[in-house]
Image (cartoon, grey):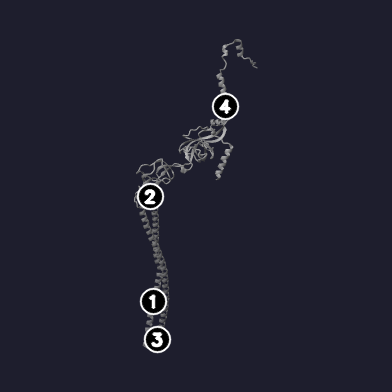
Amino acid sequence: MLNISRIRVKDEVLDKYRLHAMSTLSSPRTAIVFSRWLQVITLILLIVLFLPWQQNITGTGSVTTMSLDSRPQTIQNIIAGRIEKWYITEGDLVMKGDTLLVLSEVKDEYFDPQVLGRVNEQIDAKDQSILGYSNKIDALADQIDALKQGLNFSLQKARNKVNQSSMKVVSDSTDLIAYENNYKITLNRLSRYEDGFKDGLFSLTDLESRRLKVQEEYAKIIAQQNKFDIARQELINARIELSSLAAEYQDKIAKANSDRSSAQSSLADGESEISKLRNKYSSVKVRQNNYIVRAPQTGYIVKAIKSGIGENIKEGESIATLQPQNPEIAVELYVNPMDVALVTPGREVRVEFDGWPALQFGGWPGVSVGTFGGTVTVIDRVNSANGKFRILVVPKKKGEWPAAIRQGSGVFGWVMLSDVPIWYELWRQLNGFPPNLNQSEIDKITTKSTLGEKK
């Protein structure tokens, strides 16, 4: 035991010796007040550490629109031309279909003011050519039919001639046999007459008559043999003519088919050319209508990219920038890839626009001043060129955002997340941890992802 006494040395020394130096050792009042303030501030800070704080994700971006047709667009001409006259100035409100400027032609193939009439004349001439080819095709088709009919008739005629020649050969051969038989009979008779002449039965005159008869019969055989040979030769010629007749007509039919195919080819070429001419006619007509450049929709002319009179412009070249009249304003914010998984469609966002002073408490949106409410509608599937992910935010209520904001203005936004104590948020920030989600929010994200995959 240290056996420490409770008697204060200060009191005993002051009572016994009455030292002045010891009386000056008392604490000043300022220190006492300061210590009490420190205690109060410490207590307040401890209480503040347990106050609720709404986590958020910050992002920067600009004002844009949700609908693509409400975003600024460049007006482009369809054809190349020379600027002849302007009908607008920068800042003008133009209605859809209003004339912006007038162009003149710069291509020599369209210089002729009667180019449509010229093309139309070419179309009429080509129509006549096509009609001529059509008539030629029909005539050749009739010629081919006539040749086929003529072939059938000629073949029938040649077959009949072959049959006639064949029958004539049979007739002549029969006559030849008959003449040969008669010649044999006359020879036998001559032999009997010679024997009878020797025996004195017949006179010399009778014998000479029989010899003359033999000569006549032999002459008939020779004549009939020649006639028979001629008939056989005619049969051969008829058969040859029958064989050559088909080849002769096939050659004529093939030539007619060739001429018909050539006419059909010429007809197809003519139809192709007339189609090109009609296409040219329509193109020239459309081109002449495009000499006047009109406003594609109602809006304001922001900036004229081309200016002056007599300046040449190419096809598809930008002429001016048009801002649609009543765009549906939205905000595009860019958030870090680490935070994009925590952002879901429908989350609340607080937005601060450039030029609208605001006092923002990120964790206490209810006490923020000068900010505007919004809702996340779109989250990009891929990152942007700056490595961050873009989200699109629309007004929470219609008409809540200022009507005077312009597209392209800078924006700073806070995507609101879960409620946590301040001490937890400080600890998270010091350790570099991402914001956390409660279980109900995690279930919502999972449900939305599942529904999206099913769709």
Residue of label 4: 44
Q: Is residue 243 depicted above or below 276 in this figure?
A: below
Disc number placed over residue 288 in the picture, else none: 2
Q: Earlier in the sequence, mark 4 or mark 3?
A: 4
* Badge nearest the viewer, 4 or 3: 4
On the picture, is 259 further left or further right than 422?
left
Q: Earlier in the sequence, mark 3 or mark 1?
A: 3
Q: Earlier in the sequence, mark 1 or mark 4?
A: 4
Separation (CA) of disc 1 from disc 2: 89 Å
* Badge nearest the viewer, 1 or 4: 4
* Badge nearest the viewer, 1 or 2: 2
Say which amino acid is labelled 4.
Ile
Image spot of residue 380 (x, y percent): 50, 40
Residue of label 1: 227
Could you tell me if residue 274 is visible in this image? yes
Question: Is disc 3 placed on a helix, strand or loop?
Answer: helix
Separation (CA) of disc 4 from disc 3: 181 Å
